[in-house]
Amino acid sequence: MVAVTTASPVSFRRATHAGTPDAGSSEGSTPPPPQVALSAAERAVVAGAERALLDERRLLTAPELTALAALPDGAVMTLAALAHQVRLAWCGPEVEVEGILSAKTGGCPEDCHFCSQSSRFETPVKATPFLDTDEVLAAARETAALGASEFCIVLAVRGPDERTLRRILELVPLVQETGCNVAVSAGILTDDQARRLAEGGVHRYNHNVETARSHFPAIVSTHTWEERAETCRLVKEHGMELCCGALLNIGETDAQRIELLVQLQELEPSEVPLNFLNPRPGTPLGDRPVLSAWEAVRWIAMFRLALPSVILRYAGGREVTLRDLQAMGMTAGINALIVGNYLTTLGRSAEEDLQMLEDLRMPIGALSAAI
């Protein structure tokens, strides 16, 4: 791994939050400076990234990513434009559409500080049992009718017990009959569980590391980053596609975001869902301000520039974070969408997303990571 250290000669900007200028800095009352044209040195940083990604076809290093992340706000559209070209060059123009279903909601024993499904926090989300087969299949058919190619069954558990695993394996061939590939998100896996899911027809397994290894202990105490990473490795070893995403704005620094990007490069996921914190009442992060839309666009572009071949999926929190700039994210590196609602929060209508794709002349299609 390439370590990101505080000894870097590049100084990071201060992040901003919606409604709270520069809320993440010690000078919380200071608004961000006005945008100005990039200097020759700043343009050279972008040009170097362009050469690496489009001509040399190689991944950017941690120092290169650090230099890009430190560029001023006036560089955001330049970064977005480069990220869009990288997406087209490495992945093509198609957009993958996915629906997700919370098949078992709430009552999770883990203490992820952003999650309203944890049994350790007093939140409005209450534990419910595994949905009936008919309910799961009805949701899968609705997803397929939208033109989606992927349907993800999500369970709020630390990891699947034997009964839960058998239920998942019973559902997989039934969901496949709708025409959708089946993805599953059911927490930490053993080697045998990963093997059985792969043999049972699971196409993609979701297990988000969420944040950098160095920041993870501040967000979760009931399991480790290494435990999550080990499940990611098992998923790949047994032939499933790995879906491993991130959650931004949970107290991490810019340097830790770069650290996360390098760690994702090492895990080599096929898909990276990009979530933005939508603060949930009753959770330890429930009072945290929402990330600013401009900062979100910057980091969408940074994720694409760091991970040029992945399926980069718009996921939770995009509606409250990006608001009217959601289409801009699609031209900053995103090439996949979760349509409809999320696990415990509402998304915008599928019709709005499909219209956005039509307006942007982006065709819907099934994707695999461009290795």
Image: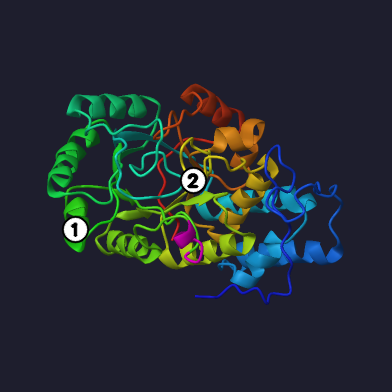
Q: Indicate whether residue 12 is drawn in magenta.
A: no
Q: Residue 174, located in which quarter of the rendered image? A: top left
Q: Residue at x 56, y 68 (%)?
A: 58
Q: Which residue is mark 2?
A: 284
Residue 181 vs 227, above or below: the answer is above
From the viewer's perspective, tell me whether residue 271 is left or right of residue 348: left
Q: Indicate whether residue 217 is drawn in magenta.
A: yes
Position of the C terminus, as image quadrant, is bottom left
Residue 68 vs 98, above or below: the answer is below
Magenta stretch bounds: 213-218
Looking at the rendered structure, the secondary structure element under dot 1 is helix
Q: Residue at x 45, y 62 (%)?
A: 217
Q: Which residue is mark 1?
A: 195
- Depth check, mark 2 against mark 1: the one in front is 2
Structural distance between the alpha carbons of marks 2 and 1: 35 Å
Q: Residue at x 58, y 43 (%)?
A: 288
Residue type indicated by callout 2: Pro
